[in-house]
Amino acid sequence: MIFNEDAVKPRKSARQARSAATVEVILEAAARILEKAGPSGFTTNAIADRAGVSVGSLYQYFPNKDAITRALIRRELEALETAVNAIDRTQTAPAPLDCFIDRAVAQQLRRPSLAKVLEVEEDRLGANSDRGPVRARIATLLSGILADAGHPAGPDVVQDVIALIATLVNAAASRNEDDATSLRSRVRLVIDARLKAL
């Protein structure tokens, strides 16, 4: 299905503190609905009710629920970007790749139900310009980390590593696994195997 990207862009940006706070309340309400009810309970009326705002106020910022979903995906990607940007690539212990894995696993396990739903929704919505730059910056950072460690760091390897992390974490979340230490170890083993296969 092809989406008109303009139809799911936010209507206006939240430049003032009060507007930004309203947008954040709407996004958090949407996140909680997706976590509890999934897409079936995800309506603009339900989001507005949960956020404690009128539907009219919601529509001032978002033209529809897909625009809210996109903003949620972008919010989660930006949180990951902030976390991975804090990695000191000059440190030796723990290795920067381990730090990247740790932050990516932590991001996914922070709200595993939301992460799983947003991945499905992102596939449904397709690639969009508002999320692409964030994903590209995360991929560039990972490429640098891999190159610094002497690994091949081409786009296919970087995307494989990102996909492996998401797949393993989502599978663990499906089993209600919450042992982050064990999960990080398994993720590193799988990534090491992928890197050795080159």
Image (spheres, rainbow, N blue to C red):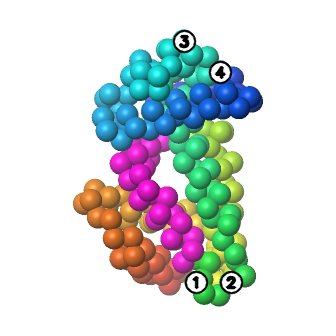
Disc 4 designates what residue? 11
Disc 3 designates what residue? 56
Cβ atoms under marks 1 and 2 closer than 8 Å: yes
Rendering coords of residue 106 (x, y %): 47, 63
**Reading the chain from its start, which is encountered first: label 2 or label 4?**
4
Picture residue at 69% right of the left edge, 57% below the top: 137
Q: State the separation of the CA atoms marked 3 and 4.
A: 12 Å
Q: State the separation of the CA atoms marked 2 and 4.
A: 43 Å
Which residue range is magenta in the image? Answer: 98-122
**133 displayed left or right of 73:** right
Picture residue at 45% right of the left edge, 32% below the top: 29
**33 to 65, vertically: above or below:** below
Cβ atoms under marks 3 and 4 closer than 8 Å: no
Give the SS element for disc 2. Answer: loop
Q: Can you name the residue that lies furthest to the top here?
A: 56
Rendering coords of residue 150 (x, y %): 66, 85
Give the SS element for disc 1. Answer: loop
Residue 18 in view, yes or no: yes
**76 displayed left or right of 175:** right
Count the marks: how many?
4
Disc 2 designates what residue? 91
Q: State the separation of the CA atoms marked 3 and 2.
A: 50 Å
How busy is the neighbourhood of tag 2: few (under 14 within 10 Å), some, or many (20 plus)?
few
Give the amino acid type for the residue marked by disc 2 in the picture.
Answer: Gln
What is the number of the mark on residue 94?
Answer: 1
**Reading the chain from its start, which is encountered first: label 1 or label 4?**
4
How busy is the neighbourhood of tag 4: few (under 14 within 10 Å), some, or many (20 plus)?
some
Give the amino acid type for the residue marked by disc 3 in the picture.
Answer: Gly
